[in-house]
Image (cartoon, rainbow, N blue to C red):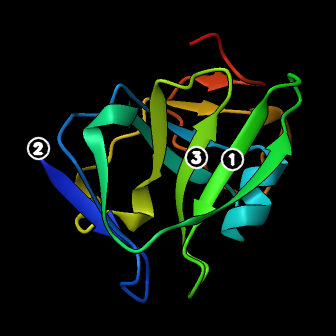
């Protein structure tokens, strides 16, 4: 995978660059991710927070409580609404990047499907990936 790599929103108002490779990559099937993406799951990779620099614009964040009692803050472009980032209060050292926001998302490789107990029946998940019904221990 290329490092550094970059990404941004649909309209170009918010851009970022990461100087580190992902720590982990997932497909999250929780209902909140379904609602924020408008589809069956959110493909997300986590990178060390200090490795990500926002090079243009400023995302807006929406914070909600997760089923574990922790919080999840989802960052999006205030102009076009594209989802870009996720911050987990349980893991403040990492920043989740939405794979579709990458300039070249073709190299994204998820390692696991999580929250599969809320996966939609019409979602054709990769049978080769491990499945976890809720949030795994990280």
Tag 3 near tag 1, CB within 8 Å: yes
Mark 3 and mark 1 lie on one chain; the one further toward the N terminus is 1
Tag 1 near tag 2, CB within 8 Å: no
Q: Mark on residue 73?
A: 1
Q: Look at discs 1 and 2 and give the one toward the viewer.
A: 1
Q: Is residue 120 visible?
A: no
Tell me which corner region of the image, top left, top right, bottom left or bottom right, holds residue 88.
top right
Using the numbered discs, state the Cα–Cα distance from disc 2 to disc 3 in whole angstroms.
Answer: 20 Å
Under circle 2, the secondary element is loop
Q: Quadrant of the C terminus?
A: top right
Q: Which residue is mark 2?
A: 3
Using the numbered discs, state the Cα–Cα distance from disc 1 to disc 2 in whole angstroms.
Answer: 25 Å
Point out residue 103 in the picture as x, y percentages from the top left corner.
25, 69
In the image, residue 7 above or below residue 31: below
Q: Is residue 58 visible?
A: yes
**Residue situated in front as seen by the camera: 106 or 36:** 36
Q: Which residue is mark 3?
A: 86
Under circle 1, the secondary element is strand
In the image, residue 32 above or below residue 58: above
Task: Judge from the rendering whether residue 138 lies leftward or rightward of residue 2; answer left or right.
Answer: right
């Amino acid at each position: 995978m290329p490092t550094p790599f970059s990404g941004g929103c649909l309209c170009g108002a918010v851009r970022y660059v990461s100087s580190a490779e992902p720590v982990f990559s997932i497909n999250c099937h929780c209902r909140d991710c379904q609602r924020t993406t408008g589809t069956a799951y959110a493909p997300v990779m986590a990178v060390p927070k200090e490795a990500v620099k926002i090079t243009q614009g400023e995302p807006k964040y929406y914070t909600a409580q997760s089923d574990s009692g922790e919080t999840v803050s989802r960052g999006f472009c205030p102009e076009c609404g594209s989802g870009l980032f996720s911050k987990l209060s349980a893991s403040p050292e990492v920043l989740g990047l939405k794979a579709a926001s990458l300039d070249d998302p073709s190299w994204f490789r998820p390692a696991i499907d999580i929250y599969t107990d809320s996966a939609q029946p019409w979602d054709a998940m990769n049978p080769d990936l491990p499945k976890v019904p809720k949030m795994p221990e990280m």
